[in-house]
Amino acid sequence: MGYDVHLYFLPVDPDQTSWDADTVLDRIGELMDKPRSETGLRSSVSRSGWHIEAVRQAAETFGSKAFTFLEEPFTCLSAPELAATVGSLAVLLAEAATGVEQLQTTCTAGANEFFLAEERQTINADAQSAYVQAFLEAKPAHEIEWSGDAGYSASVGYFAFLKSLMIGMTECLITGKQMLVYRSDC
């Protein structure tokens, strides 16, 4: 049985360089009830942190260590760190768009056939087609909710997480902000 891991990421001014756990939690708390499209706060919830682990494992298959910050309870990414992570994330998204199974750790091809038959009868049941369709269906959002341990909907949630992370990081780079990242289970 797993537990929910919350990951929050938000743009912050680069002049605030000192962060501790209380300050991070206060900042997130201040923004929770405000419109996320205005504050830039984004969050992802996944069972046992598999979004986080899956993106780290996928990046490592390409020799990238850009996502090691996800192992920390909180961190603030500078522009150079954001740029390096965006570069790695772009590689992952390009590969994910082609349906590469190795980037997806949520289920086997056999399990996908079952879930596709149940959930998406119009999609070819082979794993590569399923991942391509899940990637196309995934929409970035300010709030990504956990969507299952395995199968098609879990893949959609994972890809929505990747796309949302890319948008959040890119927005920080464009606006000259840093990105504050908080992980609830550390």
Image: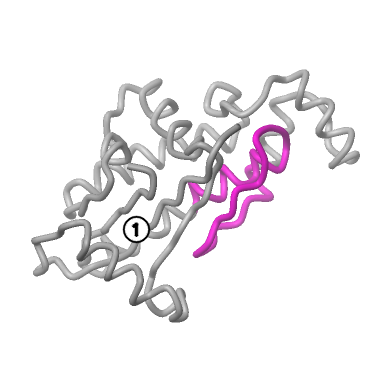
Residue 177: where, in percent of width, then height? 22, 66
Residue 65 belongs to magenta span: no
Residue 152 belongs to magenta span: yes
Which amino acid, by three-letter code, is at mark 1?
Thr
Q: Residue at x 60, y 32 (%)?
A: 1
Quarter assignment of residue 181: bottom left
Q: Residue at x 43, y 38 (%)?
A: 52
Q: Where's the C terminus, which quadrant?
A: top left
Position of 110 relative to 140 (above/below): above
Query: Is 180 or 84 nearer to us in this picture?
Result: 180
Q: Which residue is situated farthest in the front direction here? A: 1
**35 horizontally vs 39: left or right:** right
Residue 91: where, in percent of width, then height? 41, 35
Residue 62: where, in percent of width, then height? 37, 23
Q: Residue at x 73, y 33 (%)?
A: 130
Task: Provide the residue designation for mark 1.
Answer: 170
Position of 99 relative to 160 (above/below): above
Q: Residue at x 45, y 58 (%)?
A: 43
**180 horizontally vs 60: left or right:** left
Quarter assignment of residue 90: top left
Q: Residues within 10 Å of mark 1 (few under 14, many from 20)?
A: some
Residue 105: where, in percent of width, then height? 57, 26
Instruction: Give the magenta-colored segment's residue range.
Output: 135-163
Position of 135 relative to 26 (above/below): above
Label 1 element class? helix
Q: Disc count in the image?
A: 1
Query: Is 25 or 172 nearer to us in this picture?
Result: 25
